Image (cartoon, rainbow, N blue to C red):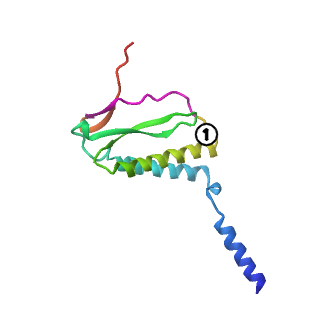
Amino acid sequence: MKRLSFILLATLFLASCTNDEATTQEQDAAKLEKMHQEIITLSLATTQSCTDAKDWDFTPLGTKACGGVALYIPYSKKINKEAFLAKVKAYTDAQTAYDIKWNIMSTCEVIIPPTGVDCVDGKPKLSYAKALY
């Protein structure tokens, strides 16, 4: 009986020790994609009509493996900004962990931050300063 109890306890212990290290790169990438899609949905950028640019803001999303921001996305100021930005941070942290875990390489160009958001054909579009050269 003691032996059965020990085996049961050892099995339960080993089962509780599973972690993300056992996932495949494809599984990790799918988790990132799901998080990304959730953020895009929560931003309302694809579902809410943009009629006044003052109702919109933008935030960096993700990181490049080489360092720096991966991209910027617009989001409606009508959402719960604190919860939204917490999800953005969680995604960015998860992407950094993914890049480290899977030894991901990327280009090292610098992504220029937008200067604001414009409404174009009812959709929020990031705006950028015009080059002076």
Position of residue 20 relative to residue 117, above or below, is below
26 to 120, vertically: above or below = below
Quarter of the figure that contains the N terminus: bottom right
State the residue in front, 27 or 11. Answer: 11
Is residue 98 left or right of 59 when viewed as pictured? right
Q: Which residue ends up furthest to the right in the rendered image?
A: 3
Residue occupied by mark 1: 104
Tell me the SS state at disc 1: loop
Is 14 on the left or on the right of 123, as rendered? right
Magenta stretch in the rendered image: 106-119
Q: Is residue 111 above or below residue 122?
A: above
Instruction: Please provide percent x and percent y for residue 109.
Output: 52, 27
Magenta stretch: dominant secondary structure: loop
Judged left or right of residue 96, residue 75 is left
Packing grade of label 1 (10 A; few <14, some 14-19, many >=20) is few
Q: Residue at x 33, y 51 (%)?
A: 80
Within the image, what quadrant is residue 130 found in?
Answer: top left
Confirm whether the magenta stretch covers residue 111.
Answer: yes
* Location of residue 75 by image quarter: top left
Q: Amino acid at mark 1?
A: Ile
Q: Position of residue 4 (x, y in %)?
A: 75, 82
On-image quarter of the C terminus: top left
Return the residue nearer the eye: 50 or 5: 5
Q: Residue at x 31, y 50 (%)?
A: 79
Residue 33 lies, in percent from the top left, at 48, 48
**Residue that sits furthest to the top in the current view:** 133
> Which residue is most to the front?
82
Q: Residue at x 40, y 39 (%)?
A: 59
